[in-house]
Image (cartoon, helix red, strand yellow):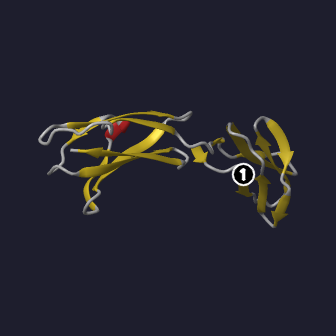
């Protein structure tokens, strides 16, 4: 089980029951620890100030006869950094020809990979959305516009932790 978090804390929370329960503990990034807080059969620890990294944890309990039970290992990936994004086309430095296929050409970089990319094109004179498309596999694509005018394209990307970045360009046809 892997979870991505865009914050610097994680809550480890388990329920531990046994008629003769002796101890409930957990392992965090290879270090055995005692839970900071419990209430009845509920145990929890708030791990704070975490840096961007992968953290694996699991919990276990044992009873007075030294019988033990373990949870499955869980991994969280702390990722608080937005993906980087560069939009190279359409080119905003010249007027494109009408009835020409235009290209959305961009590059994305993220430590844990981009999760999704999409773009929106708006006609700036009428503020009408011309296109709002998801880019499968965050791949470059092509598009057309209905008339000569000025348009704004906004490109969005988010990563597995939900960190979002966007960039925009204005271009003319």
Q: Residue 15 appears in which quarter of the rendering?
A: bottom right
Residue carrying label 1: 9
Q: Is residue 38 visible?
A: yes
Instruction: Estimate the x, y position of residue 155 in percent, counting from the top left.
Output: 39, 46
Q: Is 164 drawn above or below residue 39 in the view shown? A: above
Please tell me which residue lies in front, 31 or 47: 47
Q: 11 or 63: nearer the eye? A: 11
Quarter-wise, where is residue 122 in the image?
Answer: bottom left
Q: Is residue 16 left or right of residue 54?
A: right
Q: Taking 152 as reference, is 113 left or right? A: right
**Is 91 left or right of 27, judged from the image as shown?**
left
Task: State the SS at label 1.
Answer: loop
Q: Position of residue 26 (x, y in %)?
A: 79, 46
- Residue placed furthest toward the bottom: 40
Query: Which corner quadrant holds the N terminus?
Result: top right
**In the shown orientation, is residue 105 left or right of residue 37?**
left
Which residue is drawn at the image coordinates 75% and 37% (left, top)?
29
Q: How many marks?
A: 1
The residue at 51%/44% (across/down) is 160
Q: Position of residue 63 (x, y in %)?
A: 83, 51
Residue 101, image x and y in percent?
Answer: 17, 37
Q: Residue at x 58, y 46 (%)?
A: 3
């Amino acid at each position: 089980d892997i979870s991505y978090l865009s914050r610097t804390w994680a809550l480890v929370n388990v329920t531990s029951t046994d008629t003769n329960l002796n101890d409930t503990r957990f392992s965090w990034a290879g270090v055995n620890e005692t839970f900071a807080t419990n209430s009845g059969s509920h145990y929890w620890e708030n791990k704070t100030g975490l840096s961007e990294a992968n953290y694996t944890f699991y919990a276990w309990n044992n009873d007075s006869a030294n019988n033990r039970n373990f949870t499955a290992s869980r991994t969280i990936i702390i990722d608080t950094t937005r993906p980087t994004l560069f939009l190279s086309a359409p080119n905003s430095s010249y007027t494109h020809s009408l009835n020409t296929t235009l290209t959305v050409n961009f590059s994305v970089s993220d430590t844990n990979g981009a999760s999704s990319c999409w773009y929106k094109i708006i006609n700036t004179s009428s503020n009408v959305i011309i296109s709002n498309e998801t880019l499968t596999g965050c791949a470059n694509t092509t598009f057309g516009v209905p008339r000569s005018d000025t348009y704004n394209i906004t490109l969005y990307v988010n990563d597995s932790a939900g960190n979002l970045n966007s960039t925009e360009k204005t271009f003319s046809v």
